[in-house]
Amino acid sequence: MINYTVRRLLLAVVILWGALTLVFAVVRLVPGDPVSVILGPDATADEVADARRELGLERNVVIQYANFLGRVTQLDFGQSFRHNRDAFEMVIERLPATVTLALTAICIALVASFLLGIAAALRPRGVADRVISVLSLVGQSLPSFWVGIILLLIFARQLGWLPSAGNSTPQHLILPAVTLALPFTSILVRLIRSGLLEVLGEGYIQTARSKGLRESIVLFRHALRNMLIPVVTVAGLQLGALLGGTVVVEEVFSWPGLGRLLVDAIGNRDYTVIQASIAFVTTAFVLVNLVVDLLYAYIDPRVRVVN
């Protein structure tokens, strides 16, 4: 287990380094000069040169890269070009909104997927199973931004039941959370259904039934517990993906989280905020995957042997 953990930690460090390097390179390949965005089109050549010197953009790109990696190890991403504030502090300020949205989405997805997955597995090839299977397939195929816009048009514009933008009340959380939860629910429903159908055909389930145990006890005590490992694994991986996948949804619903901060920073060519935002999302994703890998290997020793 120790060797497995060390290998996974080293792999996580390599992935983080690769992601940070890619972010550094990509933000400098994006067309547009951040100094021109900050100073405007009327800035003189001297003002532009002074600003570039102050921001460190006149240095060789290799030196910029070395300085960037050195500062990242100290959680120092520099000052925002646009807002003249610490970029990492700006990311931390937006974090609670994004985490709230992601956790609410995953709670909705878990509850809905277990209810629908169990209902489908109990009557395989029945009407409920066919309807749930088709809906889960459709839900997995729809892009989040399209779902978000449709929900906005129906529940905010036409019916007026829910607010369309902001985060001032709990009602503001419903539409973006449901939008994020839909594809996750579709994946889990199919996973739970197939897992339950496989487990319900095992010999120990037939033995439990032959002993006269109630079907609810057979289902919840014996069947569900033995098919939770893949569900927990996928749920952990999806939590990391949700933290990064809120970018589009936050923009659609004007949710003031990390995604909107990143979109604004890209529009303003704010290198430091872009790097801090993507670095944080990448780190969260890698850490969640690392924890899931370690838990999976702890629960099932065969994983350690295979790896």
Image (cartoon, rainbow, N blue to C red):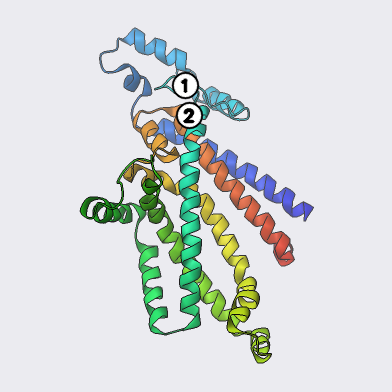
Q: Which mark is residue 85?
A: 1
Residue under pointer 2: 90
Quadrant of the frame with the C terminus: bottom right
Asked if 23 appears above or below 291 in the picture, the reply is above
Q: Quadrant of residue 265?
A: top left
Q: Which mark is residue 226?
A: none
Q: Point out residue 281 in the picture as x, y percentages from the top left corner.
A: 51, 42
Instruction: Name which residue lies at 45% across and 23% down.
Output: 80
Near mark 2 (Cα within 10 A), the count class, few <14, some 14-19 or many ≥20, is some
Q: Amino acid at mark 2?
A: Met
Specify whether 257 is left or right of 3. Answer: left
**Residue farthest to the left?**
158
Specify whether 73 is left or right of 33. Answer: right
Q: Point out residue 82 in the picture as x, y percentages from the top left corner.
A: 39, 22
Q: Which mark sits nearer the N-terminus, 1 or 2?
A: 1
Q: Amino acid at mark 1?
A: Arg
**Residue farthest to the right?**
2
Quadrant of the frame with the N terminus: bottom right
**Along the viewing direction, whichever of 52 and 177 lies nearer the viewer:** 177
Instruction: Name which residue lies at 38% across and 83% down.
Output: 127
Asked if 79 appears above or below 131 in the picture, the reply is above
Q: Point out residue 277 in the picture as x, y percentages from the top left corner.
A: 48, 36
Q: Point out residue 57 in the picture as x, y percentages from the top left corner.
A: 45, 19
Near mark 1 (Cα within 10 A), the count class, few <14, some 14-19 or many ≥20, is few
Asked if 112 appears above or below 291 in the picture, the reply is below
Do callouts 1 and 2 mark residues in contact (Cβ within 8 Å)? yes
**Along the viewing direction, whichever of 113 and 287 lies nearer the viewer:** 113
Instruction: Name which residue lies at 59% across and 85% down.
Output: 201
Specify whether 44 is left or right of 50. Answer: left
Q: Secondary structure at mark 2?
A: helix
